[in-house]
Image (cartoon, rainbow, N blue to C red):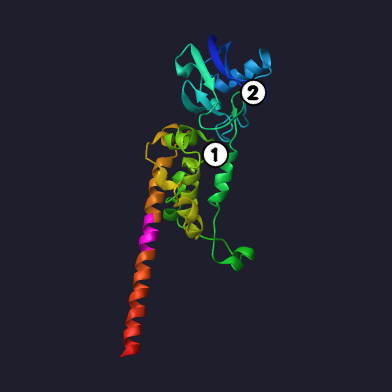
Amino acid sequence: MSELRKVQFKVFRFNPSIDTSPKWKIYEVEVDRGSTVLDALLKIKEEQDPSLAVRYSCRQAICGSCGMMINGKQRLACFTRVLELNTRVVVVEPLNNYPIVRDLITDFSDLFNKEKMVKPYIIRDDTLEMLNPTGMYLQKPEELLEYLQFADCIECGLCSSACPTYSTDSLFLTPMILNKAFRFSADSRDMGLHHRLPIIDSEHGCWRCHFAVACSSVCPKGIDPAKSIQLLKRMIASASIFKLVKKKETQLVSRHHAVESVV
C-alpha cells in the first residue's frame, strides 16, 4: 500500500463576475505517489470546497483541458504527479496570457478564432474530386514524416501561455496556431499555402516569433512549435522567391516577344 503524505495546495481563486481582485486559498490534501495534481484538486472540490472551478475531461493527457500553472510552469494537471514536484507546497494558478473565466479556468476563444483564420484543414484545387471523390489522396511514408512530428497537438494552449511574444502582442497568432498552419501547409496532399499566406505572412504572423523556444519546453506531447515556426518561415520565403523568379521569367518572355514583334 502506498504511503500517504500531506501536501499543501496554494490555489488561485477569482470569479470576475463577483470578485474585485484575486485571492489565494490554502488546502491540505493527502496524496500518494500515484496522485496527480488533478486528483488533488478534485479531492479538494469534493471534500473541502465545492466552489472551486477546474476544467478537465479525459484525465489521460489527450484532451488538453486541464492546462494550468503548477509551481510557475505550464503543465497538464492530469499528467503531473504531486510527489514528483518534490515540494511541500504546490502552487496552482490559471495559465498566463488568457482571460480568466473563473479560478483555474481560462478562456481560449482568441485561440480558436485565430485557428479558423489559418484554415486548419486540407485545401485542394481539384474541387470536383473533393465534392465527388473517386478515391483516396495517397501519401508516401516519407511525405508523412514531413509533418508527423507536428500533428499531435492536443490544443492545450500551454505553448501559447509560455510564449513571451503573445504576452506582449495579443494579436500574435501564437505558437499553437502557427504550428497548425505549418502542419497542413507541409502536408503533401494540401494546396492551400497561398490561402493561408495573408494571415501567417503578416505583421502578427510567424515573423513576430523571436525563437525563445519557451513554447517547445512546455509541450506535453513533445511537439516542437518553435521548430515548426522556423520551418514555416522557410516555406514562406521559398514560396516568395519562387513567385519572384516566375514573375521575372514572365517579364523576360514578354520582353523577348515584344522585341520580336517590333523587329
In front of the other: 147 or 74: 74
First to last magenta residue range: 237-242
In front of the other: 107 or 41: 107
Evaluate whether residue 190 shows in this view. no
Q: Amino acid at mark 1?
A: Glu
Question: Could you tell me residue 226's position as x and y percent?
Answer: 40, 41
Q: Amino acid at mark 2?
A: Asn
Q: Quadrant of the N terminus?
A: top right
SS for callout 1: loop
In the drawing, does residue 246 fall left or right of residue 139?
A: left
Q: Which residue is mark 1?
A: 155
Evaluate whether residue 257 shows in this view. yes
Disc 1 from disc 2: Cα separation: 24 Å
Circle 1/circle 2 CB separation < 8 Å: no
- Identify the mark at residue 15; answer none if there is no mark: 2
On screen, residue 249 above or below 79? below
On screen, residue 8 above or below 144? above
User: Is residue 199 within the magenta segment?
Assistant: no
